[in-house]
Amino acid sequence: MSETFLSLTATYGVWIVVTSAYLSCLAIPIPTALVMLAAGAFAAAGDLEYSTLLPLAWMAAVLGDQTGYWIGRKAGGRIVDLLSTSAKRKDLIARARQTVLDKGGVGVFFSTWLFAPLGPWVNLTAGVVGLGWLRFTVWDAAGEAIWVTGYLTLGFLFGDQLDALASLMSNLSGFLVAALVTLGLGWMLRNRLSRAHAKAPH
């Protein structure tokens, strides 16, 4: 399955990235993290444009979260009853509901990147329990910015080691992902400043 999505990313580029980012926010089992890493690697190779990928992937993820939120808002408890057909999913929904009730917008923020598997269910239950739309949107957009930027940037920086990176990322916490991204962005900024300084007339 992973090889299929890598092939699709190579063929369809930004469209497969956008589609996977949107659908994964609705709990569709798509290896979006791998797609993001691959897209970042293709951007580093010049096959895709990083400055295009980043905002489009972010908007797709936010739109997917918004869709989940409004499904919960409009369907209410009926959608929860309909989806709680397995013990595992019922537990995820219960944890998501408690996260929203206890943490509110902060819970939404962390569910987008630090506890990503819980994210789609947090979106849904945020709508069900009536978390304010603006509050949800602000925290969600901020969290998705970290998630999307993180994976695209890691793919951009270390795309030549994609298999090892994908395996490593599956075992790292969100905090370590964020730390790696921060270091990577710092490295990119330092290189650009160094090049600019070297080109400047003395």
Image (cartoon, rainbow, N blue to C red):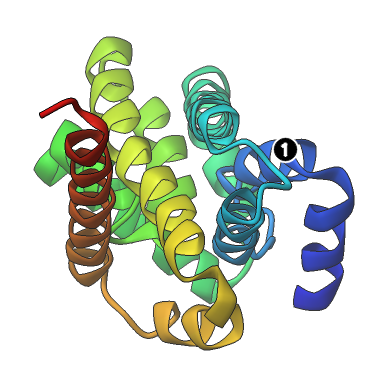
Nearest the viewer among 187 and 133 is 187
Q: Where 172 sits versus 32, above or below?
A: below
* Residue 1 visible, this orientation: no
Residue 63 found in image quarter? top right
Q: Residue at x 27, y 59 (%)?
A: 184
* Residue 193 visible, this orientation: yes
Q: Where 155 sits versus 56, above or below?
A: below
Picture coordinates of residue 161 (x, y %)? Answer: 54, 81
* Residue 126 as seen in the image, left or right of residue 99: right
Picture coordinates of residue 175 (x, y %)? Answer: 18, 65
Which residue corresponds to mark 1?
Answer: 14
Q: Residue at x 64, y 62 (%)?
A: 38
Nearest the viewer among 120 and 169 is 169
Hey, what amino acid is under mark 1?
Val
Nearest the viewer among 27 and 176 is 176
* Residue 136 as seen in the image, left or right of residue 124: left
